[in-house]
């Protein structure tokens, strides 16, 4: 699960490139969106979606407080738990708390949208854990003691603006599919889920389609930074192929020349019945297997 503005936010840095603590990229509406003070990479994105799911499963508390254990988080993210994994998870949670992001064209306190608006926000407002977790990160805790932290509870507080947006609706995504994807494929998968309102029925049974113009800003939003456009197009095409193989909702994702012949576009076809959408909480079944237990 994820909030739609964060799914569209172009400041996520997925892929093999070195991460930066401060970046500025154009968003869907052409405005500059920023992330600063801490990098937001693949592990941070996975941790955020996991925390959002936990928030939902814990009754969608209005105060945004989520309780969990590092052991459970490690099992879901990595399939196992150990000192190295805990250090990475702890760093990811710290980054979610430290990062200051700028969302353009929206007042997150009211939901009002305008091209002149910008909101500078944190994702997490507070993190409460145990000192031993810091010792793990610094390599000062004996491996034999790591297992003793399995039941230690961690608490985080989702930012108030984020809770307000989630209470209005969120995007439900399949956790097992998410774990099969990485890099540009995962980033594109999130992005397409948040673009659900822009898909149009094709006239073919249970099919909807979307065409997206490809330019430097679009590549940057997916963290595709090759020097040549053709290399970015090739990487995008490979990402689309991986999504189609992993997610049954998607029938085809291809890169092709625009009908005018002046450039390229990404063409997406997916099944209407299976496609992810932003949904009100009341419409989401608490038994939906977004995250395997």
Image (cartoon, rainbow, N blue to C red):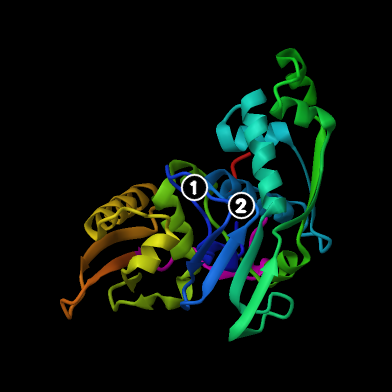
Residue 9: x and y, percent?
Answer: 54, 64
Residue nearer the viewer, 137 or 182: 137
Q: Which residue of the protein is positioned furthest toward the left in this rendering?
A: 261
Asked if residue 69 can be seen in this view, the reply is: yes
Magenta highlight range: 270-287
**Quadrant of the image containing the C terminus:** top right
Q: Main secondary structure of the magenta part?
A: loop
Let me know if residue 274 appears in the view: no
Q: Are marks 2 and 1 in contact (CB under 8 Å)?
A: yes
Horizontal relation, residue 143 to residue 195: left or right = right
Q: In percent of the image, x 61 and y 52: which residue is there?
A: 49
Q: Secondary structure at mark 2?
A: helix
The circle on residue 49 is 2
> Residue 178 got which mark?
1
The residue at 83%/31% (across/down) is 131
Label disc, if present, on residue 143 of the rendered structure: none
**Residue 243 left/right relative to 62:** left
Left or right, 99 with reference to 268: right
The reply to whether the magenta stretch includes residue 282 is yes
The picture quadrant where one finds residue 270 is: bottom left
Measured in 3D between alpha carbons, the distance from the residue under mark 2 to the one under mark 1, in whole angstroms, is 10 Å
Seen in the picture, residue 229 relative to 199 is either above or below; the reply is: above
Mark 2 or 1 closer to N-term? 2
- Of 30 and 242, which appears nearest the observer? 30
In the displayed structure, 100 sits above or below 200; it is above
* Residue 156: percent from left, percent from top: 78, 49
Query: Could you tell whether 126 is left or right of 190 in the image?
Result: right
């Amino acid at each position: 699960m994820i909030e739609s503005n964060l799914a569209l936010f172009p400041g996520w840095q997925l892929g093999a490139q070195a991460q930066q603590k401060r970046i500025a990229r154009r968003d869907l509406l052409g405005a500059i969106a920023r992330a600063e003070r801490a990098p937001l990479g693949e592990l941070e994105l996975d941790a955020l979606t996991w925390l959002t799911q936990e928030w939902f499963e814990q009754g969608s508390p209005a105060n945004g407080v989520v309780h969990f254990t590092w052991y459970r988080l490690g099992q879901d993210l990595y399939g196992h738990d150990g000192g190295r994994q805990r250090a990475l998870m702890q760093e990811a949670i710290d980054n979610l708390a430290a990062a200051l992001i700028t969302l353009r064209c929206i007042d997150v306190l009211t939901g009002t949208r305008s091209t002149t608006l910008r909101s500078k926000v944190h994702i997490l407002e507070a993190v409460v854990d145990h000192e031993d977790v810091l010792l793990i990160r610094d390599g000062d805790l004996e491996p034999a003691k790591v297992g003793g932290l399995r039941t230690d509870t961690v608490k985080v507080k989702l930012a108030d603006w984020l809770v307000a947006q989630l209470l209005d609706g969120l995007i439900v995504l399949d956790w097992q599919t998410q774990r099969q994807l990485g890099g540009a494929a995962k980033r594109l998968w999130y992005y397409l889920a948040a673009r659900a309102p822009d898909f149009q029925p094709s006239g073919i049974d249970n099919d909807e389609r979307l065409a997206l113009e490809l330019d430097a800003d679009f590549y940057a939003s997916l963290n595709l930074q090759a020097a040549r456009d053709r290399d970015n197009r090739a990487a995008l095409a490979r990402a689309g192929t991986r999504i189609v193989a992993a997610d049954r909702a998607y029938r085809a994702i291809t890169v092709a020349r625009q009908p005018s012949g002046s450039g390229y576009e990404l063409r997406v076809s997916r099944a209407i019945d299976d496609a992810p959408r932003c949904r009100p909480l009341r419409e989401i079944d608490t038994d939906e297997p977004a995250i395997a237990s």
